[in-house]
């Protein structure tokens, strides 16, 4: 929705481009973007525009988002292994065999949890860059701060302050807990994973990411309004209509907290995912190829 609002090019999602660097996550994201903005009047309206390249936060969506998806897939696979493992110590095999080992050590999950935390933080980072870009008056058709009457009105400046603060907090939480170890038990336990700290930090970053994406959705819906009467494809149009059921277009400074919370709940409840997946099935769009089954639908 934000890509459409900012008249981003679809050329960056061309399958021929991603066949040359075939990371699964990157190809997955590029394909999803092509599906989501398919049949868009907005895309057709600027097909022959003079812009050569979009900023990275638009042009590199497949590469950045895809890298995070690869990280999440790695974490998912290792977590499934851990959930189906025996981590006791000692491990009792029979009445006559008990082995004392290190199956309890949290390193196999501590490292990918730190990796997953960084992956989540980067999604928030690039989302904040898109929000900031949409507030500038450099995008044709988008007013400064996403509001026609600024000056006395500050527009969407304060929501971007919020995402900037959340991104900054996430950066401070990205130091890998697994890089630290403090000996205990008189040196018997001389190297530990600190994986519990990795998990808590990753969860906190994920919570901040939900807020950042909610604010991007809030801003994207506002920017999308300025493309009327042009429409996107049916999937993005449905998403925008869903947002507008609870969040109005903002034309003057008002208290935005409740609207932002509504947008965050849409993200937390996976409402747009459910909406687009259901609509795509009805339209018989292919959302279930092998790559999608690997990564799941988010």
Image (tube, helix red, strand yellow):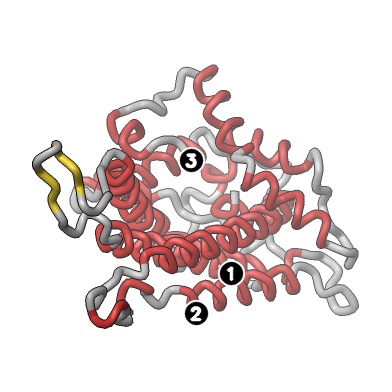
Dot 2 corresponds to which residue?
Answer: 172
Residue 298, label in figure: 3
Sequence-first disc among 1 and 2: 1
Q: How many angstroms separate mark 3 from mark 2 (CA)? A: 26 Å
* Residue position marked by numbered label 1 in the rendering: 133
Among the 4 quarters of the image, the one containing residue 107: bottom left
Mark nearer the N terminus (3 vs 2): 2
In front of the other: 189 or 289? 189
Q: CA distance from mark 3 to mark 1?
A: 25 Å
Residue count near mark 3 (Cα–Cα under 10 Å), binned few <14, some 14–19, many ≥20: few
Query: Element under label 3?
Result: loop
Q: Residue at x 83, y 62 (%)?
A: 256
Q: Is residue 56 visible?
A: no
Q: Are marks 1 and 2 in contact (CB under 8 Å)?
A: no
As drawn, the residue found furthest toward the front would be 95
Distance between mark 1 and mark 2 Cα atoms = 23 Å
């Amino acid at each position: 929705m934000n890509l459409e609002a900012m008249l981003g090019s679809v050329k960056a999602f061309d399958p021929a481009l991603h066949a040359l660097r075939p990371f699964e996550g990157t190809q997955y994201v590029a394909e999803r973007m092509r599906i989501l903005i398919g049949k868009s009047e907005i895309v057709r309206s600027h097909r022959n525009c003079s812009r050569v390249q979009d900023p990275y936060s638009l042009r590199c969506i497949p590469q950045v988002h895809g890298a995070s998806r690869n990280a999440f897939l790695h974490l998912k696979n290792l977590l499934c292994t851990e959930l189906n493992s025996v981590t006791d110590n000692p491990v009792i095999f029979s009445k006559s065999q008990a082995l004392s080992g290190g199956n309890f050590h949290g390193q196999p999950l501590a490292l990918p949890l730190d990796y997953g935390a960084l992956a989540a933080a980067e999604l928030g980072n690039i989302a904040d860059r898109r929000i900031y870009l949409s507030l500038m008056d450099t995008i044709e058709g988008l007013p400064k701060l996403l509001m026609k009457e600024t000056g006395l009105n500050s527009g969407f400046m304060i929501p971007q302050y919020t995402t900037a603060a959340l991104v900054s907090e996430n950066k401070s939480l990205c130091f890998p807990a697994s890089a630290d170890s403090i000996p205990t038990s008189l040196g018997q336990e001389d190297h530990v994973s600190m994986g519990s700290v990795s998990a808590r930090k990753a969860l906190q970053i994920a919570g901040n990411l939900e807020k950042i994406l909610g604010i991007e959705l809030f801003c994207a819906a506002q920017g999308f309004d300025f493309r009327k009467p042009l429409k996107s494809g049916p999937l993005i149009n449905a998403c925008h209509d869903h947002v507008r059921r609870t969040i109005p277009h903002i034309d003057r400074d008002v208290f935005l907290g409740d609207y932002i919370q509504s947008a965050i709940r849409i993200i937390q409840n996976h409402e747009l995912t459910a909406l687009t997946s259901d609509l795509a099935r009805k339209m018989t769009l292919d959302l279930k190829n092998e790559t999608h089954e690997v990564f799941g639908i988010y």
